[in-house]
Image (cartoon, grey):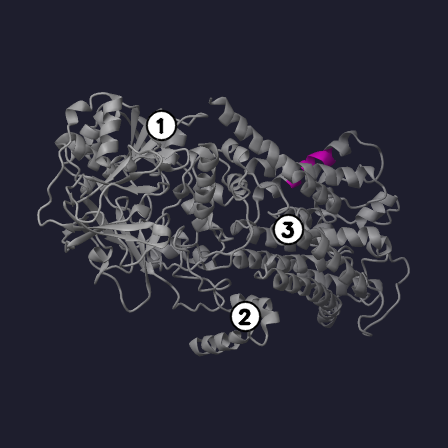
Amino acid sequence: MEKFYQLWKKFGKNFEQGGKLEKLSSFYDAFDTFLFTPTTTAKKVGAQIHDGSDSKRTMIIVVLALIPCLLFGMFNVGYQHLLATGQLAEGLTCCLWWKALGFGALAIIPFYLVSYIVGLGIEFIVAQIKHEEVAEGYLVTGFILPLILPINTPLWQVAIATAFAVIFAKEVFGGTGYNIFNVALIARAFLFFAYPNSMTGDSCFVRLGSTWGWDGGAAVDGWTGATTLTQLSTGAVTESASFWETVNGLMPGCVGETCVWAILLGAILLLATGVASWKVMVSILATAGITAALFNAFGSDSAIAQYPWYMQLVSGGLLFGAVFMATDPVTGARTECGKWIYGALIGFIVILVRVLNPGYPEGMMLAILLGNAFAPLIDWCVVRKNINKRLKRA
Amino acid sequence: MQQIILKRGLDIPMDGKAELALGSVNRPEVFKIVPDHFAGITPKLDVKVGDKVKAGSPLFHDKTFEAMLFTSPVSGTVQEIVRGDRRKILSINILADAKIEYAKFDVKKADTAEGVKTLLLESGLWPLIMQRPYACIALPNKEPQAIFISTFCSGPLAPDYEWVLKGQGAILQAAVTALSKIATVYVGIKAGAVAPEFRGLKDCILYEVAGAHPAGNPSVQINNIRPMRQGETIWTIGIQNLALIGRLFAKGIVDMQKKVALAGPMAYGRQYYNVLPGMPVSAVLESNYHKEVPCRFIAGNALDGHQVMLDDMMSIYTNLYTVIGEGTDVHEFMGWMFPRFNAFHFGQTDPAKMIVDNCFMKWLFGERKYQWDARLKGGRRAIIVSGEYDKVLPMDIYPEQLIKAMIALNLDKMIELGANEVAPEDFALCEYVCTSKMPLQAIVRQALDTMRKEIE
C-alpha cells in the first residue's frame, strides 16, 4: 500500500500549480481524498485532534442506506414489466426472477450514469473554478435522484433536470451545505412541471417497451399502470392494493419508493448511525397519520379522503421522503425543537395535497419543498425564544 | 452546596496521563519573557538593557491600561531586548541570578477592593484574571459582578489539581479572601473530589459540577450556576493561577513557579515539573518525546491548547504540555469507509464502534486503545450535519447559530445569541466532533476580538 501511495503522490505532482494537468487538480484532489485520508494536520491554534468521522463517512452511510431501495427497485421495474406484458401468467420462476432483476438493472443503470456524469461533472468544474475540494453532497443527491423518478422518464430530461438542479438549486447558493432546497427534489420538481407527461399518468411508472432492444412487449388486457394514489385521486379505482401488498411494494411507482421493507432497512441504518434525525421521521409519520385519520373521520366521501390513514402512510413516496429526503440536514430545520415542527408541517401538507388537490395524486415532493422553504423561519422562531430568554435575564 | 449535573459533553479517552510525581528541570541561565503570550495587549517597555530586576519588578506595561504591569519571574539583569519587524518586542531576555530575589509588596494596603486591584495590577498577576465577555485579560476599567474559579480541568489528560495544590489551602484561601472584596467568588468543585484545600474554602460560594468535559470550563459553570446578564462582566481564574495570586497575598511576593504536567501518548517522563515562565519549552520536553515519529507539542490539552515548538518559551498560562503524533506519516487507505479500530469516533458512523463497543465485545476484548494524532481526517466543508455541536456544549446556547453569526461578524446577532458568555475553549469539543472540520475556535477568537474592538 505504501508503494501505491508513493506512486499516486508522484502522479499527483502533475496536478500541482504549474504542473501539466493543473486544470484537472480538483479532479485529482477528489480521488486523492477518496483513496487516502488527507494528512492535513491541525492548525497551530485550535483543536489539535479531530474526530474520525468526516463528511465522506456521513455521506456514504446515506448511500449504503439507499441500497436496499435500489436493489428492490431494480427487481420491481423488471417485475412490473413482466407482469404488464403477461409473462408472469405461470407464476414467478427462478429464471423469470433473474430476468426481472436484469431487466430492471438495465433500465436503471443508465439513469445513474446520466445523473452522476452530469451532476458530478458540474461539481468538478465548479470546484476547479473555485479552487475548492469537491464536496460529497452530490454522491447522495445523484443516488437518490433515479430512485424518485418514474422508470419511463427520458434520459435527456433527466440530464436537463440534473443540470438545472445542481446549478440553480445548489451551486448558485455556494455549493453543498448552502442550498435552501433539496437538490434531488428540485430536479424532480423541474421534471414535474416542465415535462408533466413524463411524470404523471398511467403509463410512466411501468416500462412496457424494450430496454436497449431487449424484451419488448405490449400490455395485456385489463392491465393498468396507474399507482393506487392516482387511481384514488381520479376516482377510477379498478382494484385497490391491500395493506400488505402496499408494504411489500410489488406495484407501480417511482423506482425506489414502493417497498416499505427496503425503506425501513435504510431507516434502521440511518437511525442507528445517527446520520438522520429520528425526530423528523417520527414527526412526519405521526402528523401525516393524524391528518389522514381526521380526513377519514370528518372528510368528504371521496375515495382518497376515505383512504385509511395507515394506507396513506405506506403508499406513494411518503415513507421514502420522510426517511431519506426530509431528513437532509442542510435543507431541513437545524434546531432540535425545530425538527419536530418541520416534520409536522411536512406530514400535514402531504396529506392535504393528496386529499384536497385532485391534480396532484402525490404530495410528498411539494410538502418537503415547502418544508425546506419554511425551515429557516422555524429555526428563527426557536432561536428567538432563546434570545428572548437571554434578554429577560437583564 | 449547589450541584449541577451536566448531561451533554464528551470525555476524550486519551492515554498517557501524567503520573503524580515531580521531575527535575534544568534551569536555564537566560529567561525570555514573551509579551505575545499576553493576548490583546500592546507592550510598552519599562526596562532597558543592563537594568537589574527582581522577581516581581515590572518589565513592561500595557499601552491602554498603563497601570497593568507585567513583571519578571526571576531576578537578574536585563541582557537583551529582542525586537522583530516594526520594532515589535519579541522577548525580554533576563540573565537570571543564581538565587531568586523577590520584590516585596505591601499586602496590608490591600484591604479594600481598590487596594486588592492595585496590588494585582502592580504585581503583574492581574493578567492571570480573564473576563467574560471577550474572553480576554480582565479590563481594569470594568467592575466584575462575580468571580468564577474552577478547581478542575476536564479536558483530555488534565493535570490533577488536587495533587498539584496539596497542602496549599491557606494560600488559596488568601487569594479567595482578597478577591471576595471585589465581587462574590464562586468556586466550582468536581463532583467526587475530596481535597480539603478546595472543599474548605471560605468567603466564597462553593458548588459541585458533575459530568463530562467541558464541565470544568468556567463558561459552562457560569452558564449553569449564574447566567450572565446583559452588560455584566464576570472574571474567571484558573486554579493554579489562583495559587500564584494567593502567594502574593499570603507572603507579599510574586512567585510564578508552577507545576506543569507533561502528558500524552507520545511523551516519556510523564509527570509534573516545577517551571517558571520564560523557560524554553524544551526544558521539559527535550528527551521526553518519541523521536522516531513526527510529534506535535501542545501547550495545554489536545482540544483547546495550541501547538508550540521546542525553542518557544513557556507562558505563565500553561499548566500542561501534551505530546501527540503529528500523523503525517499515516497513510490511511480509504479511511472514510473502512472501520477504524484504533480511532475514536464520537458519532455512530464507524462500524468498528458499532460492532466492537457493544457490551459483549467489550467484555471479550476489553476497552479499546485509541491512537491520536493531529490529522483532520477529512476535508474542510460547509456546516452540513445538524445538532452535532449541541451534543457537546452543555450551555443554554445555540452553538451553530452563534458560530454562523460569528462567521458573518454580525455583532448584534452574536451578542443576542450569547457571544458574551463564551470563550474559544468552549467550542473546542465542537471543533473536535465537527464532521465539516470547521476551525471553530479560531472563528470564535476572531469574533470576540472584533467585538471587543468595536464595543470598547
Q: Main secondary structure of the magenta part?
A: helix
Coordinates of residue B24 in the picture (x, y in percent): 13, 54
In the rendered image of this protein, does residue B63 appear above or below residue A86?
above
Q: Secondary structure at mark 1?
A: loop
Q: Position of residue A327 (x, y in %)?
A: 62, 47
Range drawn in magenta: A284-293
Judge the density around disc 3: few (<14), some (14-19), many (≥20) Cα neighbours within 10 Å. Answer: many
> Which chain letter goes with mark 3?
A
Give yes or no for contact between labels 3 and 1 (Cβ–Cβ under 8 Å). Answer: no
Residue B291 showing in the rendered view: yes
- Whether residue B453 is situated above or below residue A26 in the rendered picture: above
Instruction: Report the amino acid beneath label 2.
Output: Gln
Position above or below: A356 against B434: above
Q: Position of residue A193 (x, y in %)?
A: 82, 50
* Rendered image quadrant of residue A136: bottom right
Rendered-image quadrant of the C terminus of chain B: top left
- Which residue, given by chain and number where applicable, does mark 1 sit on? B141
Pointer 2 residue = A17
State the separation of the CA atoms marked 3 and 1: 55 Å
Which chain is home to disc 2? A
Q: CA distance from mark 3 to mark 2?
A: 40 Å
Q: Are marks 3 and 1 on the same chain?
A: no
| Residue located beneath label 3 in the image | A324
Give the farthest residue toward the left. B99
Residue A309's mark?
A: none
Q: Nearer the viewer, residue A164 or A309?
A: A164
Dot 3 falls on a residue whose secondary structure is helix
